[in-house]
Image (spheres, rainbow, N blue to C red):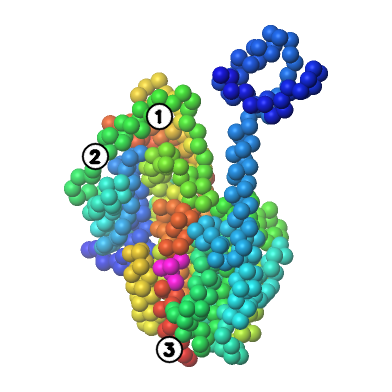
Amino acid sequence: HTQLDFWLSPRGLGLPVDVRVPFPSLQAVKAHLEAAGVSYSIMIEDVQALLDEEQTEMLRSSRVLALSTDTFNYEAYHTIDEIYSFMDMLVAENPNLVSKLEIGRSTENRPLYVLKFSTGGTNRPAVWIDTGIHSREWVTQASGVWFAKKIVQDHANNEGVASILETMDIFLEIVTNPDGFAFTHTTNRMWRKTRSKNSGSICVGVDPNRNWDAGFGGAGASGNPCTETYHGPYPNSEPEVKSIVDFVKSHGNIKAFISIHSYSQLLLYPYGYTKTPVPDQQELHELSAKAVAALSSLHGTKYKYGSIITTIYQASGSTVDWTYNQGIKYSFTFELRDTGRYGFLLPAKQIVPTAEETWLALKVIMEHARDNMY
Amino acid sequence: GAMELPPSHFPAARAAAVAVGYLRYLRGGPGRRLELRELRRARRQDIDDVGHKYYLELELEDVLDNDRTVSCTAEVLYHLGSKTSAPDVQVTVQGELRSTEEADKEFYNRIRSLEKELVAENIPDSHGNIPPELEPIHLLAWVASGYVIWQNSTENTKLHLAQVKHVKQVKRSDEDLQFDYVVLLHEMVSQEVLPWEVSVLWHPQRGARVRRCHGPGAAR
């Protein structure tokens, strides 16, 4: 009735006995041993706690063991190591379509990887997509992983973006700010910036979306290193930004550039640093309307759209202001789900629906770029 | 007169966020979740020597009442030189909100019958998870944050509750429940995520009252 579970049974006089005692029997067993003058010591206070811990560890580590991009869990948030491993698997599984480029190194010397999707040609006109430039915007890196797999699947099934890949390349940087991303996992889930040291300040990090050479340092960014919109000491001071600048300039044939953020459910085009409308304002506005309609068609998610400065706030030194001024007409910024209910802490079960609907909008933009080559 | 504003432009969106925060404080509770579905219309009036007044038509949803549509009108007046004064807000809800009497009573009795004072942290967690039994605590955090957001908003800010960092129940000898929260508020324009301490009382009939709140910089 005490339900004692002997892990080391009684074997003979003078030999120890190990026994697991269920909680309800604890008092009775102790009393009995003490009354009989039998000394005892506690090896494990709480076996259940140990079992729970082991279970958690097993579940956690079983995610690292995703053996292929088919068993990878797209409905969960992943660490940087898991995402880098996913990228290598994707390349290994699709060597004729996907390659991995290292475009630079972060402040903390993490590699900056870009996936290139190409069916051939030389320096074809290209689409650039980046996710995770602000590290706390976890749904974006997670969507980037989904996009990568989707491109491969479309190509294999000769549908979707397969037709785009006939004449264009796609470049996808999934973890655009790896130092920040690692920091959100280990230390501060709300970290946004890079992790560069600021001379003369104890505060760390530069806002990589204020560090580009377009209206740099003007209104809409901060000169204080301790703020979230600190623009940095000079344009492209951040290796995470400079590596993209160098890549774009040396490629020379990028036709659409899309930088992905969260949250607010917005599709934005330049400018952020000035109220002056871009020359292509009308075309970009109409294209945004089409892209947003496609996005909404899937799950009914409502998006607003417009220029950065009218729709969200004034922002100087931002990515797509620079890319537009480089001549990349189709320069867009997305702010993905949601509108503030969960904000940066979007539940993992919304990753796939978010990626799916966003992909429809991206396809509209890519197809328009392909059909309106300049 | 009042000037029509495009609802997609940020001045209207910021005023709407203040109105929704205010409404959550007044009408929210552990059993009621109000979300802004759409800002339908916005107008702005610049009143000399007073400030800027926004007239809003909002479509909300009462999520726990099957996402039922709730139409509201709101007026948000940001005072000139608004550093020290909260915006004046009026909200008119069309129709009745579904009663939460049962859920409120159940929550009240559950908390009152706890032997140890409730303590929790990181709601939601990093992955956006909220244990179901903590959802009412989360909703109450939105009510308390609604007050803080209303009291601390200007035309140049847009505040959201980013996370409940910590919550501790404080047992009381009277009939109110008391929860002391540390909430992280995300300010969209500066992008800062800053901690605010908010102590809130709640009672099924009396609703929510913020007793005390303290944040970085100005405290209201």
Q: Residue at x 44, y 79 (%)?
A: A160
- Name above or below for residue B105 compared with residue A347: above
Q: Residues within 10 Å of mark 2 (few under 14, many from 20)?
A: few
Q: Residues within 10 Å of mark 1 (few under 14, many from 20)?
A: some
The residues bearing labels 2 and 1 have C-alpha atoms spaced at a distance of: 20 Å
Task: Determine the residue positioned at 72% across, 28% down.
Answer: A8
Amino acid type at circle 1 is Ile
Start and end of the magenta stretch?
Answer: A355-359
Q: Between A127 and A278, which is closer to the camera in this rendering?
A: A127
- Residue, disc 2: B99
Residue B48: % across, % down: 30, 58
Instruction: State how many labels appear.
Output: 3
Q: Which mark is residue B111?
A: 1
In terms of secondary structure, where does tag 2 sit? loop
The percent position of residue A369, horizontal first and vertical second, equals 45, 85
Q: Which residue is mark 3?
A: A371
Left/right of residue A57 with respect to residue B168 in the rendered view: right
Residue A308 seen in the current view? no
Which of these two is toward me, A105 or A100? A100
Numbered disc 3: secondary structure: helix
Q: SS class of the residue under badge 1?
A: helix
Q: Is residue B183 left or right of residue A63?
A: left
Foreground pick, B19 / B3:
B19
Q: Are both tags, 3 and 1, on one chain? A: no
Tell me which secondary structure the magenta stretch mostly adopts: helix
- The residue depicted at 63 percent of the width and 30 percent of the height is A46
